Image (cartoon, helix red, strand yellow):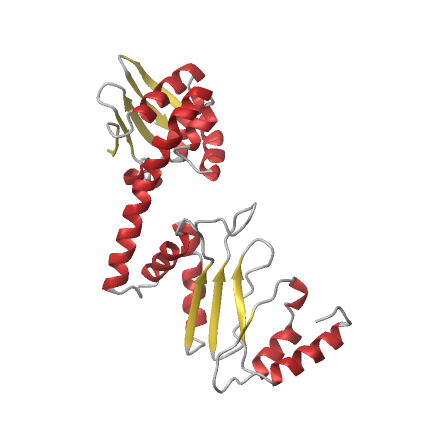
Amino acid sequence: MPPKTREELSENFSRFLEVLDVERYDFVAEFRDESWLNEEIFRLLRKYNVAYCIVDEPLLPPVIEVTGRVAYVRWHGRGSRPWYYYEYREDELKEWVPRLNKIASKVEILYGYFNNHFRGYAPKNALQMLKLLNSINSRQKQALNQILEYFDKEFIRIIKEKGHETILAGDLNAMLSLFMDKRRLERALEEKDNVKIIVHENNILAGAVKDYSFKINLIDKTIIHDCEDWRKRLSTKQFCKHIGGVFLYLAKDDATSILKDIITNIDEWKFQTQ
């Protein structure tokens, strides 16, 4: 629609909605500008039984409005450069569980769509959401397990593929980035001030980060730690913020030396819990 006054836009939009065959099809309106998110527009959508597309993205607020027989939620992603290059974390998906349950109680059908991505994040996140909602069937559960297994192997493949390059560069942050996403690395920078080294001899490094203990054994090639995020990431051999903080706390030569060993011998290193 051409830019006009708000009244003219509403009138044009109303005429457009009038011609939709809502008896045969379900329609969903997705807006790309916040100016459309107002009660007048929602009233028109309700009048013509057209669903409002509820979105999760950086440019628009996650307004929850049910305006039709069905509801449609679209997870675009929360990234940058661009925002749709994104894999939702489980805690971000959990935020939506109470919202989705509330929406589902008001409609006949609830649709959910994760923005497609060449790395396969969409089916992974969609199946994870079904699991969180206790709506996953046996075939979907099997598919999710296969996807998670693939991603576990993919993390390790990336470490092997990019490891040599990062070792040659000697950049500590680049090395840590093989084991941590940007968010965790930022939090690791905050945690390094909470690191306390108790043992640092005979190829053993042990201590605590706040209330969480850790032990790195260079002979046995093991890292033992006990936070919940660490437990979740064991199969992918990825660091939590506490272990990242330990490496940032150490002298750079010590940190890079241990990381070089882990990167070079990733298949031999064991990540464990207490």
Q: Nearer the viewer, residue 61 or 48?
A: 48
92 sits left or right of 11 in the view: left
Q: Is residue 210 visible?
A: no
232 sits left or right of 98 in the view: left
Question: Residue 123's image quarter?
Answer: bottom left
Q: Residue at x 72, y 74 (%)?
A: 9
Q: Residue at x 45, y 32 (%)?
A: 188
Q: Is residue 226 visible?
A: yes
Q: Nearer the viewer, residue 100 or 51?
A: 51
Question: Residue 160's image quarter?
Answer: top left
Q: Nearer the viewer, residue 250 or 17?
A: 17
Q: Residue furthest bottom?
A: 23
- Figure disc tally: 0
Residue 13, horizontal then vertical, whole percent = 66, 77
Rendered-image quadrant of the N terminus: bottom right
In the image, residue 7 above or below residue 141: below
6 sits left or right of 84 in the view: right
Q: Residue at x 43, y 51 (%)?
A: 118
